[in-house]
Amino acid sequence: MADKPILILGSTGPSGICLLRELLHRKKRVIAFVRPTSASKIPADLVSSNPDNLQVVHGQIDDDVALGEAVAQCSAIISLMGPVQESMSSRTPLPYPAFYENHVLPVMKKHGIKRIAAMGTISIYAEDDTAVFLRWILRTGVSWMFPAAYNAMLGIASVFKEEADIYWTIFRLPMLLGGSDETAWKADREKGEAQAGPVSNAWTGKLNRSILAKWLADWAENEGKWVRELPALSS
């Protein structure tokens, strides 16, 4: 399945666009699953210069037919789905845990797709994390100011932790920096590598989007890495 495309969920935000750039730079075949209203957010230079390697599939994440058509073609899924700025202040529950539980994971099982890397944040604790004051401040602030987003992240982790049939990875993100245009992506991807592992005193609380994209592309290329683990990423 290594020659099959990689399916990207959440590909139209800045981090998703950086990931598209990185994967296409590596000559990978990619499927971007996007809402019809968001398709125009994929930069024209990516679409025009990668006619053979970039496929854009339109659909809602709860449209199992459209999602299934995309999943059936892929070797692995990278999901950047999660609360966006417009929903951060919501006081009502956000749908992301249910999207995974009721749509993404069942569709993966139906089509025999085993690998997914899903976005989380450091609001999610892992057993091997150590106490870091900066992380406590950030986690506490998010839980108070953005409770729906905070609970959505915990809910996503709970859904995956109960899943024994899928080779999942939850990559826990800090504050993300950097642009997604071609110039910024090219410059930023040369600035180093992501640190991945438990939260510790080496965790910096920030990460450039282009460096995140490199880490995710590496994950896609290494099938046995980070299976059922929750690496916290930072610069």
Image: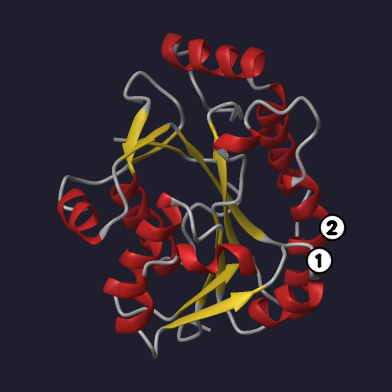
Image-based side of 227 in relation to 43, left or right:
right
Q: Percent x, y for residue 77?
A: 57, 66
Q: Percent x, y for residue 90?
A: 71, 28
Q: How many dots with numbers?
A: 2
Q: Amino acid at mark 1?
A: Pro
Q: Residue at x 72, y 48 (%)?
A: 160
In whole angstroms, how far apart are the C-alphas of marks 2 and 1? Answer: 6 Å
Which residue is more in the foreground, 34 or 209? 34
Q: Percent x, y for residue 157?
A: 69, 40
Helix, strand or loop at disc 1?
helix
Which residue is more in the foreground, 171 or 98? 98
**Which numbered dot is residue 102?**
2
**Which numbered dot is residue 185?**
none
The part of the image, by quadrant, that contains residue 71 is: bottom right
Q: Residue at x 67, y 74 (%)?
A: 113
Q: Do the residues bearing badges 2 and 1 touch, measured as CB atoms within 8 Å?
A: yes
